[in-house]
Structures are given as structure tokens and as C-alpha cells.
Amino acid sequence: MRKLFYSAIIVVTIFSTISTMAQHTLTVQVNEPGAKVQSTMWGIFFEDINFAADGGVYAELVKNRSFEFLWPLMGWEVTKDDNALGEFLVINRGDENPNNPRFLRLTCKTDSIPYGLINEGFRGMGVKKDNLYDFSIIARKHAGDVKLKIELIDTLGTVLGQTSLENFSENWTKYEAELTCNNTYPKAKLRILLEGPGSLDMDMISLFPRDTWKNRKNGLRADLVQMLADMKPGFIRFPGGCVVEGHHLDLRYQWKKTVGKLEDRKLIINRWNTEFDYRPAHDYFQSYGLGFYEYFLLAEDIGAEPVPILNCGMACQFNSAEVVPLDQLDPYIQDALDLIEFANGAPTTKWGGLRAEMGHPTPFNLKFLGIGNEQWGEQYIERYKIISEAIRKVHPEINLISGSGPWRAGELLEYLWGELKHMETDLVDEHYYCPPEWFLKNANRYDSYDRKCPKVFAGEFAAHGKEEENPTSRNTWYSAMCEAAYMTGLERNADVVYMASYAPLFANVEAWQWRPDLIWFDNLHVMGTPNYYVQKMYSTNRGSDVVPILEKGKALIGQDSLYASATIDKSTKEVCMKLVNIQARPMKVEINLTGAELSQKKAVVQVLTSENVMDYNTIENSKKVYPVENEIDISGTKFEIKLEKESFTVLKIKYK
Ligand code: AHR
């Protein structure tokens, strides 16, 4: 017993001696700028997965508004009033309207009790007290002079807001009405009741909140877009991901089908509808209300370079692996050329004209274009070569991005890089979804990359942990901390890595297929994950040039649990350090800034950490892992700071 007591005293003494000494002494060479940090360095990857578009950022509240889901009445039910007399009929116009063939004929047989339908929304409709909602419908009178009552109701049928429409014409016409909501409710429904007798043909039944992002019609959810804008992203890649490829070629993403009038955008099943048996989503379709025009607008709004990715004549190789014969790639090449015209062409051109007609006469200034997503093998190289050469001939100004499959190492990746090096590609898109420890071990991934190769677009990455017996891959602080450590390596190699984005971006808490994801939401709330705050801390503290941050002449890549990188911002005259302490106790670090004088003896410190590395945010507790910002006094160009245990710190200091 006595022996044990003595050894405990010794341990405490040794620890306190160590804790007074700095564990690391770092030199930051402020006057030795190296690689430029591209303005595109930290960006966003958008894919319509996890109900990110319909049921997510696209603010439409009505699910299956045009009755084009595989089951025409999915999302709709008949009102349950046994005394009501009525009927409905789904009519298919076929070739007369090939992009939107179906409509609904609703008939009410009496003048005493209305007959109608209820739409359930996307896991309900989130509505807010005193907010305005815009209802619209394309309708024509079929028989009688009917009136349409439009109501927002709660799950008990209590009316939360209402409006009505009448005097319908016999020709298809768009009608609009607004209603105000009297209560905040997460799971409202839309009830439309026909007062007869008579019948009405109905299509494109739509309800939008008025307070969309920038109050745009057919707009986006303001709270979700704000999260993106807050990141000040350098680029936004869209529309994916595997949705670009499709299970098979018929289901590939075709941008031309996503522009123009809403009612002409042909809906398709979302490939994530059936992808995972354990997360089925049978009501997951792409209405394309959020289409390429809206993506370009979003990019412009948040100050990000638009980075569209197009299909390269190959379906997903994990699914059907269908390919288009090499001599039939012309439509794919034409799609790419036309997209460049849509984005950059004068309003007098065909596709530039459509852009102008949709409301944007000035060009979107497209500079990047991806050909293919996660493709691999000879089939990809052959197709990429043909398509990229054809685009190059006409548009040498566009930076072309090639895929590199889903591999982070191995023969298949080496083969692709070997081929791509000799081809005219500007950037190679690498993807890595790996355990958190992979990120720690690979923070030096790009230190030895061939500087003459095409640049790297780390287009999809995320740490996937197995934090419970059955893997759940939550957005834990541990996963985010490991990503932060890895990203010091991306920043240090900014001469190789020109773009990087976490993936996927959004997930609906009730309708996700893939986890982890950067931002989660329900019908009324949005929540940033620890991973989101890591991305944001990098992208809002980018700097213009990398500067060396060294210990004994070496970069910090996990020695004694420390990862570090540094940049300066030549315009604001700030040095910005990113420091990640992965050890389970605080760390004292001495920092020596060389080659610069301070303009003030102060530093801005942002710290992201949490009590337990397995902590994660939820909608209810959205700030459990949340950055804290403080200003601290420092003694001069040489000073000491204490890094919290298991923390990511951004330190900014102004110099003269
Ligand atoms: O981000 C989810 C998926 O992961 C993407 O669609 C695909 O590119 C990758 O396999």
C-alpha cells in the first residue's frame, strides 16, 4: 500500500515537470512564402443523396407534384370524409406531353361536401407561424364551375392556413394564391378540396415558403443555403457523385433535362432510391426543380466557382457498368459543349439565350468541367481522351477534371494516374472514404507527389468511423479532428492540391441513405457537424500563400500527436496557423515567428474540441461540438500557447 502511494507521487511530479515545458517548439517562417493557395482550395461537393435536393435544399413542400413518380399517387391520399362523393383519375397524355405526361382529374359529385386530396410532403412539411406560403397549380376546368380550397393542416386536421382559387379556364393555365400560416409545425400537410359539383384537371401542384434564399420563386431553403454561404466556399461541385453516372445510362444525369420551364423538366427516379437495402427510399425521385440553372445561380450567390461534372458515356461501375460505344460519344461531347455555351455564351446563342430567358443574361463564367465521376479502367481512359480532346479544341480555356475511380491506392489508381499524366487533364479528382486513422497516417500523402503531374482535386473525402459494435459512422468529433489533421497536409501541399471538398454535403435526418454527412437538417432546423466546422475553419482562414511551419527543420505530421500547417494572407497581412493536437491531454507549444514584426501583440484563436472525442451534434443539441473564438495577448514573435486536448486550433496574428 505504502509503495503504491510513493509511485503515485512520483508519477504526478514527473507529469507536472513535463507539463511546464513546451512539448513542441515550432518555427513559422513568415517571410518564406511557398505555394500559392488557390482561391478554389476549400469548396463544397453537392449531390442529390440523402434528400439533399427534393425534400432538402429545394424548398418545394409538395412531394410528387406532377404525379410522375412510378406510382402516380405516391405522397397523396384521398380525404377521409365518408359522406364526400367524388372520384379521381390519373390521365396519361403520352406523346402529347412526353416530359410530363400525367395529370389528375378530380371530380366532386355534390355541392354540399367537398372532395379532395392530401399531400404528405417530404416526411411532412415544416411550416412557420406568420410566414407566407405560395401555392400554385396548372389546371383547367373539365366540368362545372368548381372552387378549390387549399389548406395547410396539422396531423389532426386542424387548419394552419388557407386560401382558395376559382374561375378556372378550359385551357391549361397556371393559378397562384398565397396563404399565411398561423402556427409553427414540423409535419404539416397540404389539403386541396374541390367544391362542386364538377371536375378539375390538375398538374404541378406546388407550395413554397415565401422566405426562400434571396426570396426567389422556385427557390432554395434559406437556412440551408446560409450554412453554405457561411463557409465562403471556393467552389461548388454539382450534381454529384454517383447521380452523374446512374445505375444504368438511362438514369444518368442529363443537364439539358433540368433547365427551362419546370413543367418540362422530366422527372427521374433517384439512383439512391434503391441503392442500399438497409436504407430504402422508395419515394426518392429527382424533380429537377433544382437544376443546372439553379446550381449556377447558387454558385454565384455564395461566391463559389461552379464545377459541374458530366457523364462520360459510362454508368456506375458498381452497378450495371454500361458503356456507350466509342464511336457514339458525340451526344456526350455535344452536351459538354452546349453546357459551356449555356454558362458562358452570349444571349444570342442557342444555350446562352436559354440562360438569358431564364433570368441571367450575363454569363456565369464557367472555368471548370468534370468528365466522369468515379470511373476507372481502360474504358474510362478511352472515353475521357475522346471527350476531353474534343472540348479542348473548342474551349482551351476550360480546366478539365478527370476522375480516378474510388481507390486511394493500388494498381487501378496507379494505372489511371499513369495514363492521365500523359493526357491533357488539368485536375484529377481523388476520393477517399476511410477510417479516421487513415487520415492521420496519410497526412503526408501529397508530400512526395510528382510536382509536374496534373493537380489534385480531393473531390470527396470523409472519415468513416466504427464507433459502435455495429458500424454507425456518425459525425463524431474524432472523425472531424482526424480530417483536420489530414487537411494540414492538403494545405502544406497547396502547389499540388488545388481543390478539396468533404462529401456528401447534406442529409435529411429522416431520409438519409449515406452517413456521415457534413450538414444535417429536418423540416425546420439545420445542424452543422463537427466536420462542418472543420471545413469552415479552413475555408474562412485560407490565406494566400503557404509558409513553412517546422520543428527541427521538419513539417509536423503527427510527431508526438501534433499536426500543423501555416499560411499568410498577403492582403490582410495575417499569418494563420492550423494546429491539431490529437493527444488526450493539453499540449504546450512554443511558437517562433521569424522574418516578420507583429503589428499588435494579440492573436485571434479559434478552438474546436469536445469533452469526449466520440461526441457529435444533433438537431436538439446542435452546438455540443462548436468552435469558440477568443482574442489572446501574446508576448511577441516568440510565445507559448496551450492546445486543448484533442483539439483543432486556428491561430491568426497580424504582422507588419
Ligand atoms: O458521396 C457519396 C458517393 O460516394 C458519391 O456519389 C460517389 O461519387 C462516391 O462513391
Image (cartoon, rainbow, N blue to C red):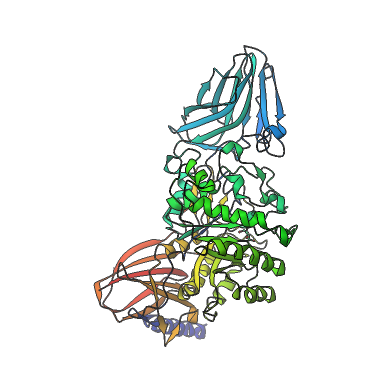
Q: Residue at x 37, y 78 (%)?
A: 33
As drawn, 210 above or below 47: above
Image position, residue 280 (x, y; %): 70, 49
Q: Quadrant of residue 597?
A: bottom left
Q: Quadrant of residue 471?
A: bottom right
Residue 460 visible in the current orientation:
no
Residue placed farthest to the top in the image? Answer: 111
Q: Residue at x 55, y 25 (%)?
A: 150
Q: Nearer the viewer, residue 537 or 59?
A: 59
Residue placed farthest to the bottom in the image? Answer: 552
Image position, residue 228 (x, y; %): 46, 53
**Left of 542 or right of it: where is 155?**
right
Q: Residue at x 63, y 59 (%)?
A: 472
**Left of 592 or right of it: where is 403?**
right
As drawn, 9 above or below 119: below
Image position, residue 216 (x, y; %): 45, 40
From the image, which quarter does the C terminus lie in?
bottom left
Image position, residue 304 (x, y; %): 45, 57
Total numbered labels: 0
Displayed-image quarter of ligand 1: bottom right
Q: Nearer the viewer, residue 597 or 626?
A: 597
Residue 655 visible in the current orientation:
yes
Q: Quadrant of residue 242?
A: bottom right
